[in-house]
Image (spheres, rainbow, N blue to C red):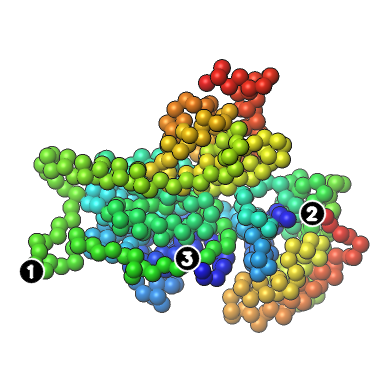
Amino acid sequence: MSEVLFMKGNEALAEAAIRAGLDAYFGYPITPQSEILEYLTAQIPKRGGVVLQAESEVAAINMIYGAAGAGSRVMTTTSSPGFSLMQEGISYIASAQLPCLLANVVRGGPGLGTIQPSQGDYFQATKGGGHGDYYMIVLAPSTVQEMADFVYLGFDLADKYRTPVMILADGALGQGMEKVTFPDYDPAARKIAKPWATTGKTPDRERNVITSLYLQPEKMEELNLVLQKKYNTIRQNEILWEEYLTDDAEVLFTAFGLAARIVRKTIQLAREKGIKAGLFRPKTVWPFPYKCLNELAHQVDLIQDIELNAGQMVEDVRLGVEGATPVFFHGRMGGMIPTPEEVLEKMEANLATVRGRNGRPKEDVR
Amino acid sequence: MTEETIIAGFGGQGVLSMGMLLAYGGVIENQEVSWMPSYGPEMRGGTANCIVINGDEPISSPIVSRFDSVVAFNQPSLDKFEAAVKPGGLLLYEEEAILNPPTRTDITIIAVPAAKAAIELKNQKVTNLVMLGAFLKAKGIIKPQTAVKALYKVLPERHHKLIPLNEKALKRGAELVRGEITAN
């Protein structure tokens, strides 16, 4: 294990990318993630690789398309408005089955919005975002350490499934500093062969073609079936989540990323008051851990979902819970952040409703 | 132990750096630490602040709304955060910047003439280090020597020649907190 460093989440992500064997980075600066481009611009010339500030996010994502097609380990990062600009390119990349790592350090929206932390891009990240039937593997870090860890994981998953992988962070995780250690990771040993890459035709094989255009619908459906099969394999194999104090929990919070950190504090406050609260935190928000959540839902009186948006992941929570217990939502928008005390108050009010005045007539409210 | 501190003032007064020294100091002393800046429009010419949490267990939320200590460098920050000090907590402020002093009676209040002390040291920019010295005297979250070590991490190398001056400012700050005032 290497030494303990103290870094911003953005810097930790950038440093991890270099250590994970990043070949090329293309990006366009936007708050609150410009430190990534800044860090890489300072480091890459000394440590090898390409770092390029594109003329726009649209250009950056198409550079990613090209460099990924040529077999390079590539990454771009941006924040919400920039990520919207990239959607067309991401759809092409998913269709052409190219591995790459994308990060959205989300800020408050919609529109040009604000530069403060938000989770308002959950739908865009997990339900497609661009056109057509595709998904990305979406990793949602909750600490600066995970901002680094998910880079390695993201690159490996991208290569394994030939698919874009994204890190869904937020402004606070990007700007805040915490301790971080970088694992031993040998990129040379981890990078896998890419026989499909357009690296120049050799006499012993047909030329490699990377495209997302198939004019015959039969061919296009065939590609879609390949993609869907791949997504099902990912759903079966790559779900990650964390549980915190769920063993004896009567109240379950669901939250991802920064919201999950706030909830951890709420849980401490709740337990000081004798309320047995726990946390279910998806680390992959696509694929979403529906089944594991459903198992927990049966043991608790209610689920309180907390997000920095108007209620997006809560739709997946409800799909997972399947009515097994009441699900409540509380969120703040536009860059505002709920306090642990505010979250506790909301949950307690809902708990009082669910339990009624005497005891807990849980069945009545379901 | 978990110490939740907010340091607030105008952009340019060194509140983010003061927080960073407290945070890096925590790392050097093997604590769990988080440093969360306000990075919004306020840092472009308004109030700036950072929340620093030092603890011996992993930090739950890096963003909190009630604090064991508030360090205020100007009146708007004091007005905004006085009510956010936990009962029994500490409010430490730069004396000259405050026209309307705090009124709470359930917390420890310390006024530090840090700007004046910095001028005596012939560099106004070390006001934040005087404040840090005073804060560490009142709340021993990290050792003063650790703060000096942290300076080597936080200051770019070209400014390392200023470290002896910063060290003096830290010491001066500690002297400004009279012995009988002990915070919780």
- Disc 3 marks which amino acid? Pro
Subunit of label 3: A
Q: Residues within 10 Å of mark 1 (few under 14, many from 20)?
A: few
Q: Position of residue A69 (x, y in %)?
A: 23, 60
For the residues labelled 1 and 2, the Cα–Cα distance comes to 76 Å
Asked if residue A273 is positioned above or below residue A242 in the image, the reply reads above
Q: Nearer the viewer, residue A219 or A326?
A: A326
Q: Nearer the viewer, residue A21 or A24?
A: A21
Q: Which residue is mark 1?
A: A203
* Label 1 secondary element: loop
Q: Position of residue B174 (x, y in %)?
A: 82, 69
* Label 3 secondary element: loop
Disc 3 and disc 2 in contact, CB within 8 angstroms: no
Q: Nearer the viewer, residue A214 or A1?
A: A1
Quarter of the image where one finds residue B16: bottom right
Disc 3 and disc 1 in contact, CB within 8 angstroms: no
Give residue B91's mark: 2
For the residues labelled 3 and 2, the Cα–Cα distance comes to 41 Å
> Mark 1 or 2, which is nearer the eye?
1
* Total marks placed: 3
- Disc 2 marks which amino acid? Leu
Q: Which residue is mark 3?
A: A183
Asked if residue B124 is positioned above or below residue A116 in the image, the reply reads below
Determine the residue located farthest toward the bottom in the rendered image.
B161
Left/right placement of residue B21 relative to residue A105 reads right
Q: Residues within 10 Å of mark 2 (few under 14, many from 20)?
A: many
Quadrant the N terminus of chain B occupies: bottom right
Determine the residue located farthest toward the front in the rendered image.
A247
